[in-house]
Image (spheres, rainbow, N blue to C red):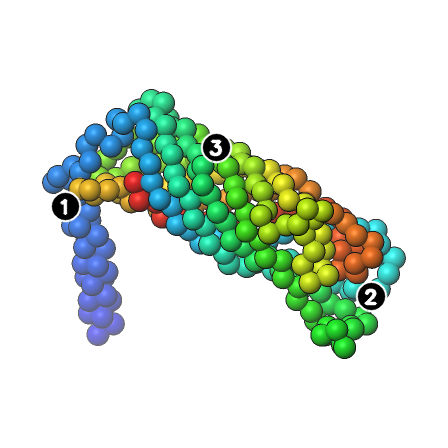
Amino acid sequence: MQYLLRRQVILVFITFCALPFGAFAQLFENQNSLDHDQKSFHFGINVGINRSHYNFTQHPRFLQYDSVLVVESINSTGLNLAWLVNKRISDHFDLRTYPLNLTFTEKAFLYSLKYPDRPAGEDTISTRKIQGITLALPVQLKFSSDRIANFKVYMMAGGKIEYDMAATKGGKNSEKLMKLKKFDYGIEAGMGFHFYFPVFVLTPEIKLGWGLNNVHLRDPDLKFSNVLDKINARSITFSLTVE
């Protein structure tokens, strides 16, 4: 009985695995958008979801005082909206940028406090959020594989500069939490896939971003800020582009 059951499971598994290959084989019947990759320029609309947080180092004050016991950076979800401009260099290399690239984020810190200010709404475990609306200008070099029917894979890497439009002139002060610089710069890398349809190209992409600039404007008078030293942004983004 167990032998027959195993045999049925194996047959079901083989049948299930064969279905995607049958669907994939249909992609070889007709090639769509044959002239897409030969254009000198092409454009697209990009929509994405990001998970971002701050990577930080502790200030010596953290060890000298015991008002803040533990600090953790929490991953938060945000949105990306961008306009893609792609310049063809060769059959395998492209130069890309996003002249209009808006990123909406809500990074957060989790504090464990020994003496919480309860009249001010603090608790032993307190979360402080920092919302941002960032205008970014990335420049990326893309390396693509050969096209297989209506499918292509690529890798990309590049740099970016960012301006936080939610920041004030002297820095951003969110809920008396901390002040952050308006400008940041960093590097990013990722990979994606092109799926060619008759009237458009759909591109899912996953990308990692590392902020290189210390964006922290440390304020000794803010207890949530004076225990931290350097702060750098980190993010992972999944996006879809329609070209």
Q: Is residue 99 above or below residue 230?
A: above
Which residue bears the numbered disc 2?
67
Q: Secondary structure at mark 3?
A: strand
Front residue (pair 38, 21) = 38
Q: Nearer the viewer, mark 1 or mark 3?
A: 3
Query: Is 5 situated left or right of 142 in this image?
Result: left
Q: Disc count in the image?
A: 3
Q: Quadrant of residue 144?
A: top left
Please rate how many residues cluster around mark 1, counting C-alpha atoms within 10 Å: few if below 14, some from 14 to 19, many from 20: few
Q: Is residue 92 above or below residue 113?
A: above
Image point (70%, 71%), residue name: 125
Q: CA distance from mark 1 to mark 3?
A: 36 Å
Q: CA distance from mark 3 to mark 2?
A: 43 Å
Is residue 113 left or right of 138 when viewed as pictured?
Answer: right
Q: Which residue is mark 3?
A: 139
Asked if residue 115 is positioned above or below residue 194 in the image, the reply reads below
Residue at the disc numbered 1 = 26
**Where on the picture, by quarter, is residue 223?**
bottom right
